Image (cartoon, rainbow, N blue to C red):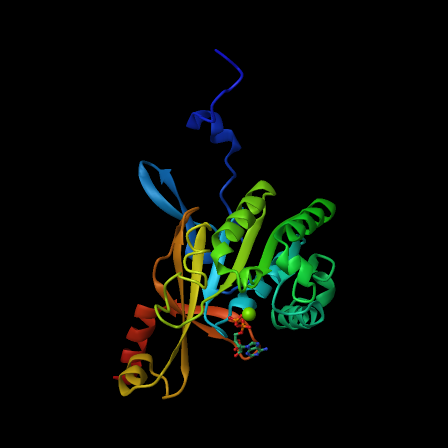
Amino acid sequence: MSTTKKYDVHLMSELKSRAPRLFGIPTGVEGLDELFYTVEIENGKVRKIPLGGYPYLSVLNITGIADTGKSLMAEQFAVKQASLGYKVCFVTVETPKEFLVQSLKYRATAMGIPTEKVENNILIIDCASNARLRENLDELLDTLAYAIREYDVKSVVIDSITGLYEAKEVLARSIVRKVYNFMKKWRQTCILVSQKRSSSEELTAEAAGGYGVAHIVDGTIVLYKKLIQSKFDTSTYGLPLGSIVRLMRIDGCRMTGHDTRTFVFEITSTGLVKIKAPLEEYVKSVAVVKR
Ligand SMILES: Nc1ncnc2c1ncn2[C@@H]1O[C@H](COP(=O)(O)OP(=O)(O)O)[C@@H](O)[C@H]1O
Ligand SMILES: [Mg+2]
C-alpha cells in the first residue's frame, strides 16, 4: 500500500483517533449546561448524557437584537472559565478594554467569584479602541495566535463578530469562515456574539449580514425579548403590560444533541443570565396559578 497520499480522501477508521473527545465546557449560565447532551449505547439502548456545558472545541454563535443578554452570556462564560483556571481570550469589538474590565469585575462579583481569581486568566484584545485590529482580520488573527501560543489560551470570545464586518457586509461570510477555520486550527472553544439587526423572525438564527454566521458555525443560541403588549400576552405570560419576557433557543448544534425547546430566561437584578424553564412549562404554570 502506498504511504504517500495523493488525494485528500480518508477512511473514517483512520481519522477516528484524531476526533476530539466530546465533553462540556461550563457556560457560567445557570440552567444552560444541562441543555447540551450526547448519546451512548448502554445495554442495547440509546441513552442521553448531559455534557455539562458548551461542546468542547465548538464554535458557537450567540445572536439577538440589542439588549437581549448576549454580552452578559459572553462575559459569564469568560469569567467561569477563568475561575476554573483556564485562560480565555476576550476580543472586545464594541466596548473599550477599560469598560470591559469593569464589566467583567462586576460579573465575577455577581457570580460570587473574587476578581483575583480570574484577572490573571482573562486576556483582552481591544478592537474597539484599535481600528487597525478591527479592520484588518489577518492582523487580529496574528494577535490572537500570539496570545494563544504565549498564554496557552483554551477558549476565545469575540463580542461581536458583527463589528468586524461593519459597513462591509458582503465580506461577512468570508470573515466568519476565516475566524471559524482559525478556531478549529488552534483548537479553541469559541463564542461569537452576533447582532441581529431587526426584530423580524426574532427567534431564528438569521443575523446581520444575512446568514453570514449561522450557516458556518457549529451552532447558534438565539436570544429574544418580547414586550408584553396585549391582554392575551398578560394572561399567557402572567406578566403586566409593558414588561418583558426573555426567550432563548438553541438553534441547531452540529456537534452534539441539544434541547430544542424555547426557554424562558431572566436577567437577574445583579445582571446575570439565568435559564428558568421551557416556555411550554412556564405558560402552563402561569395557567395553574391563575386557576
Ligand atoms: N448589572 C446589571 N444589572 C441588571 N441588569 C443588567 C445589568 N447589566 C445588564 N443588565 C441588563 O441586561 C440587558 C442585556 O445586556 P447585554 O448583555 O449587554 O445586551 P446585548 O445583547 O446587547 O449584548 C441590558 O439591557 C440590561 O437591561
Ligand atoms: Mg452587547
Q: Residue at x 40, y 61 (%)?
A: 206
Front residue of this view, candidates 131 and 46:
131
Identify whether 271 is placed above or below 252: below
Residue 147 lies, with reference to residue 101, above or below; the image says above
Q: In terms of image quadrants, where is residue 135?
A: bottom right
Q: What residue do we see at 33% from left, 42% from top? A: 46
Residue 56 at least partly seen: no
Name the foreground residue: 167 vs 271: 167
Above or below: residue 21 compared with residue 7: below
**Where 100 sits versus 239, above or below?**
above
The quadrant of the rendered image in which ligand 2 is seen is: bottom right
**Can residue 145 be spotted in the picture?**
yes
Counting from the top left corner in percent of width and height, residue 52 is at: 49, 53
Res 249 quadrant in image: bottom left
Residue 275 versus residue 226: which sits nearer the camera? Answer: 226
Whole-percent x, y for residue 180 in the image:
53, 48
Numbered circles on residues, count: 0
- Residue 250, given in percent of the width and then of the height, sits at 40, 59
Q: Residue at x 58, y 43 (%)?
A: 187
Q: Position of residue 105 (x, y in %)?
A: 68, 70
Left or right: 54 as drawn, with respect to 240:
right
Q: Quadrant of the C terminus?
A: bottom left
